[in-house]
Image (cartoon, rainbow, N blue to C red):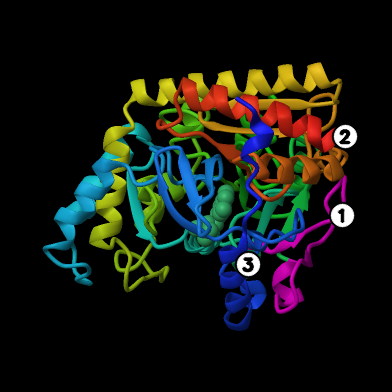
Amino acid sequence: MNVSNSLRTNNTRSAEIMARARGRFPGGVNSPVRAFRGVGGEPFVAARGKGAFVWDADGNEYIDYILSWGPLVLGHAPQVVLDALAKVMQDGTSFGMPTEREVDLADMIAARMPHLEMVRFTSSGTEAAMSIARLARAITKREYILKFEGCYHGHADAFLVRAGSGVATLGLPDSPGVPEALAKLTLTCAYNDLEAVEKIAREVPLAAIMLEPIVGNGGYIEPTAEFIPGLRRIADETGALLVFDEVMTGFRIAYGGAAERFGVTPDLTALGKVIGGGLPVAAYGGKREFMEHIAPTGPVYQAGTLSGNPLAMAGGLATLGALTREVHDGITAQTANLVQGMRDIAARHGVPFTASHSGSMWGFFFRDGVVRTFEDAKLSDVSLFKRFFHAARRRGVSLAPSAFEAAFMSSAHGPAEIAETLNRLDDALGAALA
Ligand code: PLP
């Protein structure tokens, strides 16, 4: 295929819509990363998606690896989800009362993650993480939370905090509007730095040690073999709760998530993305004894008008129902093929490159060697990433518009789509280097 003949150069409609959007939304978007500030240029406006593909408002087709930032593990508009939604909506779109589907989805989650004995559904990952912070503080009667540089846990005040590199410093707010007094309760240290964690946990009474078990919000960063077991030990020895934020990794890095992948059971877990299959669902959960602190059984208040929404539950049930272990393994194999293909392309072009995946979550950096921390990630060639991103996009491959975001794969991406992606990315890298 002559890739250069198929450059996506017509973006007229997208530009028109974005011009209107800028009058209505800050930056023209309803979530900042969509504005392409990380790569420059004009975002394309999505019009529709099917399977591995997304089409923009000008009719350009892209093989999509954003996949709504993770939820679409079956690809865009899978028939099982469409059918489930069409059926369920006939009976009403919201009740604000208990429904059976909520129990069904909680059962399905617990069948794969048995440590989630009880859950509470929310509508976003931010709410799930925020509620976990409150719950962990209430359970332990402690106020400090330890998080890791490059990990994102939604935009609640407690998590919009980072610290200087190396050993933790007291938190400074990442965003105006986050009270410094609150930010001080969030401590931060480098991912994979067990020594720093140990030191902090022995000096400061931590309510929770919270992490993305594989980082997807600082680029794709894997833990060392010792890191997660080490966190479990430190949490146990110091009385902190260990919290896995699996909003991104859940039902992606392994069939049973991080606990299965790393053999470590957290005290509390946040889920999102895949458990709604593209509808607004997230959840937090853990042992019954912990979750019973939540109202109305316990005093820790947390609520939501649309929590457990029937359409959202149906999206999750259809998605997890179709995501059998066999399907998960199939997506994993395709992800491995893509990642290896990209390594081969980079090697042919003589470019420093590292790429990895776990299940259907993957990522790459333009640099040599293993990336263990967000600081390592920042040493990658971001300028080359930006050129590569735009070259890929012009050739019909949609990658996350940031050098510091993980990518995803779906069951709709078959060998033909992977081969075509690699063909286009090979050409794109050549163009980015020219
Ligand atoms: N936690 C993690 C690990 C995430 O990746 C995200 C979102 O990307 C969130 C929490 C926040 O979820 P939401 O965007 O649904 O609020």
Check disc 2: other Cα within 10 Å, few if <14, some if 14-19, many if 20+: few
- Please give the range of residues in magenta: 159-184
Asked if residue 230 lies left or right of residue 53, the reply is: right
63 magenta-colored: no
Q: Nearer the viewer, residue 270 or 426?
A: 426
196 or 8: nearer the viewer = 8
Residue 219 location (% of width, % of height)? 70, 41
| SS type, badge 1 | loop
Label 2's element?
loop
Q: Is residue 286 left or right of residue 338?
A: left
Q: What residue type is labelled 1?
A: Gly
Q: Which residue lies furthest to the left in this view?
A: 91
Near mark 1 (Cα within 10 A), the count class, few <14, some 14-19 or many ≥20, is some
Q: In this view, does 292 lie above or below 381?
A: below
Q: Main secondary structure of the magenta part?
A: loop
Q: Which residue is drawn at 73% across and 34% down?
A: 428
Residue corresponding to mark 1: 164
Q: Where is residue 270 in the image (x, y as percent from the top left)?
A: 48, 50
Which image quadrant shows ligand 1?
bottom right
Q: Work out whether residue 263 can be spotted.
A: no
Which dot marks residue 434?
2
